[in-house]
Image: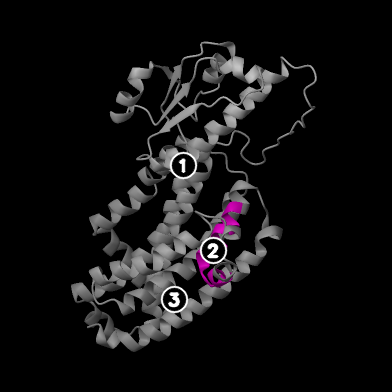
Amino acid sequence: MRAANILHLGVKELRSLLRDPIMVVLIVYSFTFAIYTAATAAPETLHKAPIAIVDEDRSQLSTRIADAFFPPLFMPPVLISQTEMDARMDAGLDTFALNIPPGFQRDVLAGRSPVIQLNVDATRMSQAFSGSGYIQAMLSSEVSAFLQGYRSNTTPTVDLALRVRFNPQLNKSWFSAVMEVINNITILSIVLTGAALIREREHGTVEHLLVMPVTPFEIMTSKVWAMALVVLAASACSLAIVVQGVLSVPIEGSIVLFLVGTALHLFATTSLGIFLGTIARSMPQLGLLLMLVLLPMEILSGSMTPRESMPEFIGVAMLAAPNTHFVMLAQAILYRGAGFAVVWPQFVSLALIGTALFALSLVRFRKTIGTMA
């Protein structure tokens, strides 16, 4: 009867979840609106930054510089006068204001080093930090190209043949949408299982479980498979409807292979959620624990910053976290179309980590279930 007990207890968990409207709304939001917002907003990158240009030179070179700014990095530049520049910056209308002085083209052709003034609104920190570098590189490129047309003895330059793999248009939404799905899978699986255990305590149904002919293993396994099934179904629908449908993000690899890896990852993260649920005594305590656990896991997993950019000891330590391996296999499958022959080390790692977390959580659950009543 053990399998039947696990099945019926899992169905009970699904019914309890359906009767919790806040959790249902959280699941729907996390795999729909949150995905769309993360893919289309991309606040950490330069996207449609407003720029104004004060062209006091009115030359061929200054016109060429003004024409170099266009979407999606910048909004079409607004030509303004010197007196308007500070007022527009104070009003927050422009993030960048470029002032090209009179005689700029003449000084460039004469071999002098003219100065262009760039005013930056640093209250828009993400755009100001990356945009200044973009503008400097664009100015250097336009001036160099302009000089080559006037000087026959220009030193030959090296042409870079740039080939972009997997995302030829460098569309940031392709990356943001998929990574948001990956991150939300980890977050929701831990939150749902931890909340399911706390809900048993708060509703007083732990006493009912203790008098039933079921074991702690059956109780814990039922919560793991039920919450994992919910997150797995939600992630599959999100990939098909939101990512591929609404956002038109191409998926290179096998969705089935990704979902198999997701199931292994959910085995580990739901077990971790049970472990945190046995430590917390209430929902507020669970929320505080999730902040301490989820934030480092998400930031250091490689989904936000490449692991190669981290200190070596942090990269090694994070190999003990399941979402590190999940991010690696998800990026390989969904972005680069990798098969099982490439990602099998991550599958093995997730299976081992999941088994260890499940065993640890089961030991903790057996010790604390009697005190949860």
Q: 186 or 115, which lies in front?
A: 115
In the rendered view, tell whether residue 336 sits above or below residue 219. above
- What residue is disc 3 on? 3
Kindly identify the amino acid type of the residue bearing the numbered disc 3. Ala
Task: Report whether 26 appears left or right of 167.
Answer: left
Q: Earlier in the sequence, mark 1 or mark 2?
A: 1
Q: In percent of the image, x 67 and y 52: which residue is there?
A: 338
Q: Amino acid at mark 2?
A: Thr
Mark 1 or 3, closer to the camera:
1
Q: CA distance from mark 2 to mark 3?
A: 32 Å
Looking at the rendered image, the disc whose residue lies closer to the viewer, 2 or 3, is 2
Is residue 298 at least partly visible in the picture? Answer: yes
Q: Is residue 5 visible?
A: no
Q: Is residue 360 left or right of residue 138?
A: left
Magenta-highlighted residues:
316-331
In terms of sequence position, does the residue under pointer 1 or pointer 3 come before the other?
3
